[in-house]
Amino acid sequence: MNHVTETKTAAAGGQPGRRRATSRVELEHVAFGLFAEKGFERTTVDDIAAAAGIGRRTFFRYFPSKNDIPWGAFELELERMRVRLKACPREVPLMDAIRLALVDFNRVESAQIPWHRRRMELILRVPALVAHSTLRFAAWRAVVAEFAAERTGQRPDALAPQAIAHAVLGVAVAAYERWLDDSGADLGVLLDSAVRELGAAFADGWHSVS
Amino acid sequence: MNHVTETKTAAAGGQPGRRRATSRVELEHVAFGLFAEKGFERTTVDDIAAAAGIGRRTFFRYFPSKNDIPWGAFELELERMRVRLKACPREVPLMDAIRLALVDFNRVESAQIPWHRRRMELILRVPALVAHSTLRFAAWRAVVAEFAAERTGQRPDALAPQAIAHAVLGVAVAAYERWLDDSGADLGVLLDSAVRELGAAFADGWHSVS
DNA sequence: GTTACGATGGCACCCAGTGCCAGCAAGGGA
DNA sequence: TCCCTTGCTGGCACTGGGTGCCATCGTAAC
């Protein structure tokens, strides 16, 4: 669920054809500006293309849909999550491993926090993007399910791995929502607490955690 | 997440104006027929309207969007879930109460199972509907969060209730997905197991449940 | 140059969803 | 019987996302 700016394509590689007119990151910036100005829904793809000085048709060669703009290089980020999970020693219990990886994966440099906030505000507050997020998060769940499967000796599509993956994603989204509500909150703490609180809820009638 | 056919509007009440030309249920049936025939995406709203003998414009007075067709009277069903949770004695631990209510809420008469399968297959397998489901499920989560909030003495939008609600929804979806994969499976058992498995995962390193 | 390659962007089209509004089908008077 | 009110219908025009097609442009290599 964390994002960073993607690696810029080499300014002038030795490729034959015409050079790209812009980049994902640049379009992302242009678009975010417009979204801040008049909101996501009231910004059309034409607006974005015009502001970026490209054709509407070209826009769709950089992003498969308007809904994908806030996602940056999420697919690449995912690899970090996978690596982070794999790096966790087997002695660490499953849910602890996932919790730690989750917190780690969502660590953002403090300079990047405002940007990350705007990004996640879009993804988790604009209805069209909330809906779309489900499709993008599926890949994230797959990573968690794969890890849980490996740990429990089941197939990734078995019930337990899937249940765990779905649940952890849900918990993470809950934490993010609280984070967005609370301008001073620490995302890492919220994510950690959210997972712990769920565990505590299972543990018995109810003990609030920390 | 369960659905039943909604109560038909009185055939001919004493109302003044023109009578309704059709009903949600009827449109739902017509639409499901077309979906089965050529798939959700390749069925246009025009197709459905034509098949039902109404105007395209009229269709949108029965359903706010094409994506809402498979949802039947979900909003009303929700009330059942709320009542079911409230009926649970306070001695029953929180997560047990939720688990029991979840299973109960999703109990379907055996005659209705094939229909329910088709419905959920659409909702959980067609990308556009998977995305849309997030928006509809929000209301379901709110019911669970409200219950968890009441039980834990927190506000419904606090971290723990939200985390629990998100997690339970996730787990339920995981169970449904398994159910759809497995034509002979029992939905109730899967839902029950899914919640238990998650609890077990938290309980420690890993003990498979039953 | 010329050629090969890859990006661009215009155009036409499909489809979901919406505002507007004329018109239709009932019931209830007068 | 004639009207009036009420409420549903559905055509029309329009917006906006997304796609297929294709001519054109810019660049590197030969």
Image (cartoon, coloured by chain):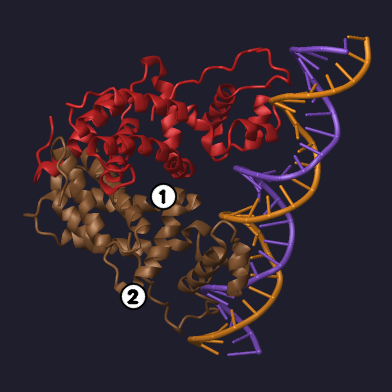
Chain colours: A brown, B red, C purple, D orange
N-term-proximal mark, 2 vs 1 = 2
The chain holding disc 2 is A
Q: Where is A111 relative to C30, above or below? A: below
> Residue D17's spot in the image, x, y percent?
57, 55
Q: Residue at x 34, y 69 (%)?
A: A113
Q: Nearer the viewer, residue D20 or C10?
A: C10
Q: Residue at x 37, y 62 (%)?
A: A74
Q: Is residue A185 visible?
A: yes
> Residue A31's spot in the image, x, y percent?
53, 67
Q: Is residue A132 left or right of residue A160?
A: right
What is the secondary structure assignment of the residue under circle 1? helix
Mark 1 residue type: Leu
> Residue A190's spot in the image, x, y percent?
25, 56
> Residue A105's spot in the image, x, y percent?
25, 62
Q: Is residue B184 visible?
A: no
Q: Is residue D23 left or right of residue D11?
A: left
Residue picked out by circle 2: A111
Q: Where is A137 relative to A154, above or below? A: below
Quarter of the image containing the N terminus of chain B?
top left
The chain holding disc 1 is A
Specify few, some or many for label 2: CA neighbours under 10 Å numbering under 14, 14-19, or 20 or more.
Answer: few
Q: Which mark is residue B24?
A: none
Quarter of the image containing the C terminus of chain B?
top left
Residue picked out by circle 1: A135
Q: Is residue A106 left or right of residue A131?
A: left
